[in-house]
Amino acid sequence: MISAETLDKAVRRGIISADQRDRIAALAAEPELAEAVEAGRDEPLRLVGGSNDLFVTIGAVLATAGLLFALQAALGAEATLIAALVGAFIWVMAEFVTRQRRMKLASTVLGLGFMAAIVTILSVFVADRLGLDAIASPVQALALRPVIGAHGGLFFAVSAMAAIAYFLRFRVPVMAGVLAVTIAGAAFFYTTLFFYDGVTSGAVAMPMLDQLPQVIARALYVPLVCGLLVFSAAVALDLNDRERFTIWSDCAFWLHVVSAPLLVHPLFILATGQDVAFGRIEPGTSASVMLGLLIAGFLYVALAIDRRSLLIPTLAYFGTLGIYYLIDRAANTSGIPPFALILLVIGGMIIVFGAGWQGIRRLIIATTLPTSLLTRLPPIRT
């Protein structure tokens, strides 16, 4: 079997492209993938590479934890140095676990651990530069505005560059999700500063207590826009790899995981009229109708793009909030605990869609979308 070093060398010399390298590595590491596609079964979820992958993941976590505790005992409160040494240790492990062995779960855990080390270093740096430990009141925090924007930009920019550098080196798909979270966090941060500047300059009045729900509802457009952008990027990657063979498909998986909560929460509140300040839903049939349409819409989109990663967070959110509202009346009249009905509804939907996913796709998507669009979407298995 061709080694990973040989494939990387072939890319550097221009013999093959990076995309071709990923396809070859995927076929070499998972020969059953092509057979599964040809046989019409569901696509393999490439998050765990087997028992050995799980075994190495446990070892990597234990080794990193052991190093962390040892450094804390030896260096005390030197958080920056400790995080830097742990990050370097994780990078060295990734050179073997990820670049040499291509272990998927271990690579994901190591990547997240590396980013945690980077975030720790940046957090300590920003806290020291701004003197956050000495802040005892909100009034003192307001004095940070002239410099907090630059430091926040530094925090998010370096975090994004670290995620990109790690991905370019190790090709770990979870870094796509980390990058999306970083960009969304920067959008939240600078939107908050923008409105704060409007209030302090007198362009925007400080909201009264009864205006807070309206203010929070308007703030929901920030995660909604971020969610739409992340979702669009994920769909673009999916359309570029309809058969789900390359690493870009795995990146799309993590982007869908990030985009789902960013989309679901704002749409749920805006569509149903939920009181965002006190967690209530306005009574009436319009909220129920809109909630049902939202659930149906997310189900349809998830089926169309063949992504359960978009559906799972959606069902979890609607199960805890939306479906509770829909069945609350029935529970009160029948005497059945609402929690029991929630479990029944969510569990039933997961079983139905999990067991008959491709059949439902054929029944709904193949009969409702034009052929010109179906040829661009992930193929519907028979």
Image (spheres, rainbow, N blue to C red):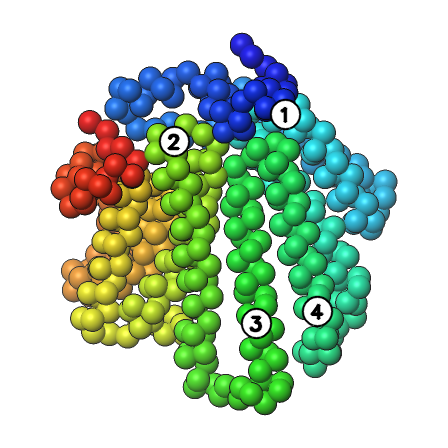
N-term-proximal mark, 1 vs 4: 1
Q: Report the amino acid beneath label 1.
A: Arg
Q: Report the amino acid beneath label 2.
A: Arg
Res. 201 image quadrant = bottom right
> Label 4 to label 2, Cα distance in Å?
42 Å
Contact between labelled residues 1 and 3, with CB atoms less than 8 Å apart: no
Q: Quadrant of the C terminus?
A: top left
Where does residue 34 sit, x and y in percent of width and height? 36, 19
Q: Which mark is residue 148?
A: 4
N-term-proximal mark, 3 vs 1: 1
* SS at circle 3: helix
Residue depicted at x 67% and y 26%: 95
Q: Which residue is mark 3?
A: 192
* SS at circle 1: helix
> Label 1 to label 2, Cα distance in Å?
25 Å
Q: Is residue 181 visible?
A: yes
Q: Which mark is residue 12?
A: 1
Front position in the image: 264 or 169 = 169
Give the foreground label among 2 and 3: 2
Q: Which mark is residue 244?
A: 2
Contact between labelled residues 2 and 4, with CB atoms less than 8 Å apart: no
